[in-house]
Image: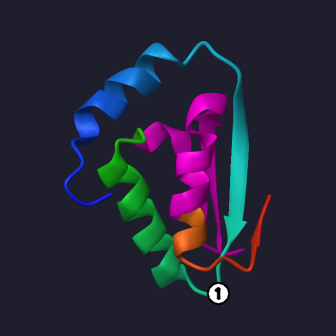
Amino acid sequence: MPGRNAQPLTEWLLRKEKTMAEALVATYKDVRTITNVEDDLLSTGIPNEKIKIDKEHRKIRVMVPDATRAEVLEILNRHEPAEVH
C-alpha cells in the first residue's frame, strides 16, 4: 500500500506466528505477474519465508494468519489471478 510503513505489519506478523495460519494459493497467467505479486507482498512486510512460488504451475502460496488474510487477498486479487483458494 502506498505510503504505508511495512515495519509495524512485519513486527505484528512475527508476533502472531503462533496463531492459526492458512495457505492462500493464487494462480496467474504468467511468471512475471507472480514476480510482481511477490514484490508487493514483500514490500507490505510479509516475510519471505511465508511465500512459496511454483513457476512451473504459475502459482504463489502465502502462509497468513487469519488476521491478515483480507489484506493478503487484496494484494493477490489486485493482480487478477485466474484462481485463488
Is residue 2 part of the magenta span, yes or no? no
Task: Indicate the position of residue 14 as horizontal and vertical percent values.
Answer: 42, 21
The chosen color scheme is rainbow
At horizontal 71% and vertical 57% (from top left) the residue drawn is: 25
Asked which quadrant contains residue 41, the reply is: bottom left
- Residue pushed farthest bottom? 29
- Quickly name the residue at label 1: 29
Task: Indicate the position of residue 1 as horizontal and vertical percent values.
Answer: 33, 57
The count of marks equals: 1
At horizontal 24% and vertical 48% (from top left) the residue drawn is: 4
At horizontal 61% and vertical 47% (from top left) the residue drawn is: 70
Local crowd size for mark 1, using a 10 Å CA cut-off: few (<14), some (14–19), many (≥20): some
Q: Looking at the image, is 16 positioned above or below residue 53?
A: above
- Rendered-image quadrant of the C terminus: bottom right
Q: Is residue 29 left or right of residue 13?
A: right
Q: Which residues are magenta?
A: 48-75
Q: Looking at the image, is 72 positioned above or below residue 67?
A: below
**SS at badge 1:** loop
Task: Indicate the position of residue 71 as horizontal and vertical percent values.
Answer: 53, 48
Which is nearer the eye, 1 or 53?
1
Q: Looking at the image, is 6 positioned above or below residue 39?
A: above
Task: Indicate the position of residue 84 as horizontal and vertical percent values.
Answer: 75, 64
Callout 1, which amino acid? Lys
Which is nearer the eye, 2 or 6?
2
Asked which quadrant contains residue 73, the reply is: bottom right
Is residue 68 part of the magenta span, yes or no? yes
